[in-house]
Image (cartoon, rainbow, N blue to C red):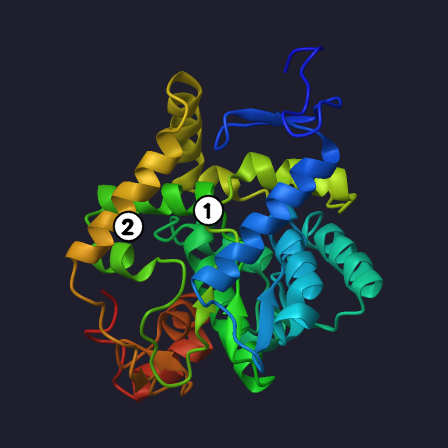
Amino acid sequence: MGRTAKCFVCGSKAVAYVPYLGEYLCKEHFIEYFERRVYETLRSFKLVAPGDRVAVAVSGGKDSLTTLYLLRKFSGRMGFEVFGVAVDEGIAGYREYKLQALSALAEELGVRIYVGRFEDYFGITLDEAVKRLKEKGMEYKPCSVCGVFRRYIINKLARELGATKLATGHNLDDEVQVFVMNALKAHMEGIEREGIASATVGEGLVPRIKPLYFITEKEVLTYTLLRGIHTPFVECPYIVYALRHPIRRWINAVEDEAPGFKYRILAVKELSRKKLPEAPEGAQKCRVCGEPSSKPVCKACLFRAYLDPGFAGRVERLKLISGSRD
C-alpha cells in the first residue's frame, strides 16, 4: 500500500487494500465492510435462525476467534444463542497458548467455552499418537488422525450441549485449498459435502455452517489486528506433514500473479458441487462407540484401534475391522 493511499469512502488514511472492492479502506470502514459481509452471509444463506443454539468450534486461532466474536456480536440482533466448543489435542508448546487466547476473549465476550480432550476421549494425546505413528512407519499422517479425532469430539460435545448449529472458522482460503486437495485425489464426495452449510446430515450430526466462507485469510488477519483480537503466533509442529502446506503456498503464489484467482477457484467449486449428486447421509451408527458413521466402524475408532492394541483387541473381538478400513 502506498504511503498516500486514502480510504475511497471518507478520504482518510487507508489501512488496507481490498481486492474484492478494488479499493482502499480506513480502519473504520474496513471493520464496517468486514462485519457487514459476514452478517449478510449469515442472513442471505439462512445460516442461523431465531432460537438457534450455535456452538462455535474454536481453536484459539484468528479465524475461529473472529467467528466467535462476530456471532456473539450478531446473536442479540438475530435471536440466537452462542457458546464455544474447543479441543485440547495435547500438543505441548502449542495448544496451551491458543487456549489461553481463547479463554481471554471468551471472558471478555461473556461466552461459555467447553473443552474436550483427546486424552479423555481416546486415552492418548496427539504427541503420544505421533510417537506411535512414527514407530509404525507413518502409515497415517498426524493431521489425518488429528482431524478425525477433532471432528469427533466437536460434534459429540456440541450435540450433547444442545447445539442446533455448529459454526466453524473456515475462510475462503481454507475452502479453496480443500477443494484443490479433493480434486487432486478425485474425492468427489468431499467436494459435494464441503459447502457453506451441510446440505444433509445423518442422525447425531450437528448441521455445520461457515460464516467466513467468502472472506479471505488476509482479510481475517487484518480484522483481528484492527479489532485487537489477540492470538499467539505459534504454529502446530506437525504442519510439515500436511498436504495442505504446499497447496497453500502454490495458491498464494498464483494469487499474487493473478489477483482474483482464489475467488475464481471458489466459483469453480460451487459450480462443480451443483453438478454432483448429493453425498450419502451418515445415517448409521458406529457399532463400537455409537457415534454417526458412514461405515460399520467410524474412522475415530479405527484410528484408536490402530494406535491402541488394547482397544484394537476389543474391535477385533467384534469382528468389525475387516472391510472397514477404506
Residue 304 placement: quadrant: bottom left
- The one nearer the camera, 2 or 237, is 2
- The one nearer the camera, 5 or 133, is 5
Identify the residue position indicated by label 2 in the image. Answer: 270
Q: Is residue 91 visible?
A: no
Which residue lies at the image location 51% right of the left edge and 39% below the top edge?
Answer: 216
Which residue lies at the image location 42% right of the left edge and 22% below the top edge?
Answer: 253
Residue 23 point in image, percent of width and height: 56, 25
Of pointers 1 and 2, the one earlier in the residue sequence = 1
Identify the residue position indicated by label 1 in the image. Answer: 214
Q: Is residue 247 visible?
A: yes
Tag 1, which secondary structure? Answer: loop
Rendered view: 244 above or below 129: above
Residue 116 point in image, percent of width and height: 63, 72
Extreme-front residue of the structure: 10
Which residue lies at the image location 75% right of the left edge and 70% below the top edge?
Answer: 111
Mark 2, residues whose alpha carbon is within 10 Å: few (<14), some, or many (≥20)? some
Rendered view: 1 above or below 208: above
Rendered view: 10 above or below 235: above
Rendered view: 16 above or below 149: above
Answer left or right for 59 relative to 104: left
Q: Amino acid at mark 1?
A: Phe
Which residue lies at the image location 78% right of the left edge and 56% below the top edge?
Answer: 100
Question: How far apart in space, not on screen, are marks 1 and 2 (Cα)?
Answer: 12 Å
Tag 2, which secondary structure? Answer: helix
Q: Amino acid at mark 2?
A: Glu
* Quarter of the picture holding the N terminus: top right
- The one nearer the camera, 165 or 152, is 165
Answer left or right for 36 relative to 11: left
Residue 292 placement: quadrant: bottom left
